[in-house]
Image: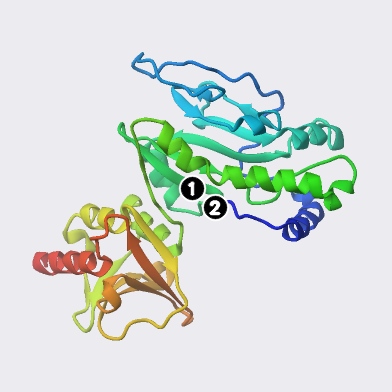
Amino acid sequence: MKIRKTSIIAALLALLLMLSLAACGAPANDPAGPDEPDQAPQTTDVTDDGADIDVPEGAFVNDGMILSVPEEYTDLLIIDTPEDDVAGTLFVVSEKASVEAGKVVHPGEDWGDGWLFSIGRANEEWLHEQLCGDMSGREIFARAENGDYYIFYTPTDVRIMREGDDYLTDETTMQQWTTLNEWAGTVPETFLNENKGLTPYTHTNTDLDIYLSRIAYKDDTNYNITFLTDGSLDPKAVDKTPYITRLLDGVTFEMVDEEAPDGEYIVLNLPDDDLRFDFFFGGDGNYVREVYGNGAELLYKATYADGATVANQVMEEWYNALADAQ
C-alpha cells in the first residue's frame, strides 16, 4: 500500500501493462479524480468547534484539516477539496498534465487519469467493516481524538496519461511522474505532523488481520481455540473483545521467509474456511503460522508499536479464560 520509488524502466513496463488493460477501467475502490476540481488554495479555515487553526502558506484546507504541498509542485497538480463528501474524502490529488490529457484521449469518460492519492476520514463502524475484507489501495494511518480514522488512498495501477505515445520514452515526463509519486509517499507523515489531535495508527491487511477482524466484528464467524490435546473451547464463554483488540491494535503482521519456531503453540481454528493460525510460544511469542486445509503454509512475524504486546501471551490469556469458564 506504500508508494514505491519506481525506476524509469520499471515505470515504463508498468505503463505498457496498464495500456493493455485499459479497457478494464479503474478499480472499484479507487476514488477517481474530479472533472473540474477547485485549484485555489485556501489560507484559513476553522475547526468544527470554531477555533482558528494555523495554516502554512500555500496549504490546502478542508473541514479543518491541512494538506501542505511543496511550492514547486503546486502548478503540476490539481487538488480537489470536496465539501461534505458522503465517502469522507477530504483531498484528491492528481497530476494536472495527466488529467488534461485524459480529457482529450477519452473525452466524457472518467478513468481517474493522473490520480496520485486521496485522504479521507471515516468513523469506527466503517473501519471495522472494511477491515474484514481486502484493503488494497487503502492505508489507515492516523486516529483522531474523537475516534475518527484517516485513510490514505492510492491507485492499484499506474494513472499517468499523455496524448500520443511519446511519453512512454520521454525521460522528463517520467521523471516528473516519479518525483510526484515519491512526494506522495511522504504525505501521511507530514499530514500527521501538521494536524493537531492525530496519532499514528498501524494496521496491515494480511489474511491474519482479516480473519481476526471478522472474529471481532462479524458475530456469525465460526471459530474455536485449541491447545495440544485439550480439545477446542467454546469461544462464546468469554468476551472476545479485549483479546482481539490487543491482538490487532498497533500491530504490523509481516510475512517472513523463515522456519516456524519449535515447540508448542495455541491454535485459532476457522473450520468454515478450512484454515487455522498457530500462535507459537517460541521465537519471542510473536510468530504466527497460517495453515490451509491443503497443507500450504505462511509464517507471520508480529511487531507491536508499544514494544510490549506479545501475540502468544494474549492468546494464552484468552485460552485460559475460556478454560476457566467451561
Taking depth in this image into account, of 92 and 326 the one nearest to the observer is 92
Residue 139, label in figure = 1
Q: Mark 2: which amino acid?
A: Lys
Residue 2, label in figure = 2
Residues tagged 1 and 2 counted as in contact (Cβ below 8 A): yes
Secondary structure, mark 2, is loop
Please name the residue shown 31% across and 70% down the image.
286
Secondary structure, mark 1, is strand
Q: Mark 1: which amino acid?
A: Glu
Please name the residue shown 22% across and 64% down the image.
314
In this figure, which colouring scheme has been used for the structure? rainbow
State whether residue 29 appears in this view: no
Task: Give above or below for 265 relative to 28.
Answer: below
Taking depth in this image into account, of 204 and 303 the one nearest to the observer is 303
Taking depth in this image into account, of 230 and 172 the one nearest to the observer is 172
Task: Give above or below for 10 relative to 111.
Answer: below
Residue 232 in the image: x percent, y percent? Answer: 23, 74
State whether residue 128 appears in this view: yes
Earlier residue among tags 1 and 2: 2
Taking depth in this image into account, of 127 and 15 the one nearest to the observer is 15
Please name the residue shown 30% across and 33% down the image.
145
Please name the residue shown 64% across and 46% down the image.
181
Horizontal side of residue 37 vs 135, given as left or right:
right
